[in-house]
Amino acid sequence: MRIHTDCVPCLMKRVLFQSRLSEGMDEKASVEAGLKVFAEGFDYSRKSVDVATEVHRASYAVLGEDPYHDLKVRADEVAAKYMDLAQKFVDSSDDKLRAALMVAVIGNIMDFGSTGGIDNPELFEKMFDKLIDQGLGIDDSDRIEAVLDKPGTVVYMFDNCGETQLDKILIRYLRSRGKRVVGMVRGRPILNDVTREDAVRSRLDKELDLMLDTGCFYVGIDWNDVPEDLMREIEGCDIIIAKGMGNYESLSDETIPVPVAHVLRTKCKPVADSIGAPLDQNVVYVRG
């Protein structure tokens, strides 16, 4: 997805948010560094995630390697409280795939500092039932169901810590249907996205047949720099499940060799318009 005017306040809001996560951070230097890179790199022909990655890299050079670390740990702890309830919701449903997708998609609200997300994990506790009751604004779950009746691989592109706890419910269902699930995490800490370290801490890695990473500091996946082992899995899989807006923005303009199921909340207007959904909707959108 190409950069949009709406990306300007959204991205700088995120930089300011991460610059205030801990006492002692150099807020002014972080914002200044990010703003300079943003001004120099802003071009409507560029992908939004390319620009965002450059801006966050400048901010992180001031803030340190993982300013979101403590927030990610809290998010996992909060979301873990809902796993039993989420599993019961799926087990009691007549359409278990759709129910598992519903559980996975509502976790995408745990996108701290972003427009349309929440700014602390504890707010999720007040929203769980409301988000479930909202249902799916776009529901292409039947296209995912169509690939589950034969053995094969699902590449699962993770997004935020916290929501990955609820992703476990969907992964367990996919594996119960005979699917091999390969998880993709970020190569280095960026935003509150899950890395290898986060996945091991939360035992997400134990839910997967294989875990690979993007190999770099990037918002989503850099399609121009995909590690060979990850590309082999992508080219050989039946479907990609891509969680969240960062993965959507990095993949939406690319020609992908397999169907891609985007499972997310439409938290910003450019993404919502691109998909063809209203703002603040739960979406399971399959393309390809």
Image (cartoon, rainbow, N blue to C red):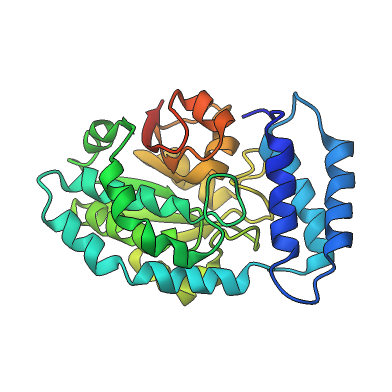
Q: Is any part of residue 9 visible from this angle?
A: yes
Q: Residue at x 12, y 49 (%)?
A: 93
Please tell me which residue lies in front, 112 or 226. 112
Please indicate whether residue 27 sits to the left or right of residue 108 in the image.
Answer: right
Please indicate whether residue 279 sits to the left or right of residue 165 in the image.
Answer: right
Q: Is residue 165 above or below residue 47?
A: below
In x, y percent, where is residue 270?
A: 58, 29
Please tell me which residue lies in front, 151 or 172. 172
Q: Is residue 106 above or below residue 251?
A: below
Q: Quadrant of the C terminus?
A: top left
In x, y percent, where is residue 136?
A: 31, 37
Q: Residue at x 39, y 66 (%)?
A: 79
In x, y percent, where is residue 237?
A: 38, 42
Picture quadrant of residue 278: top left
Q: Quadrant of the N terminus?
A: top right
Q: Is any part of residue 209 visible from this angle?
A: no
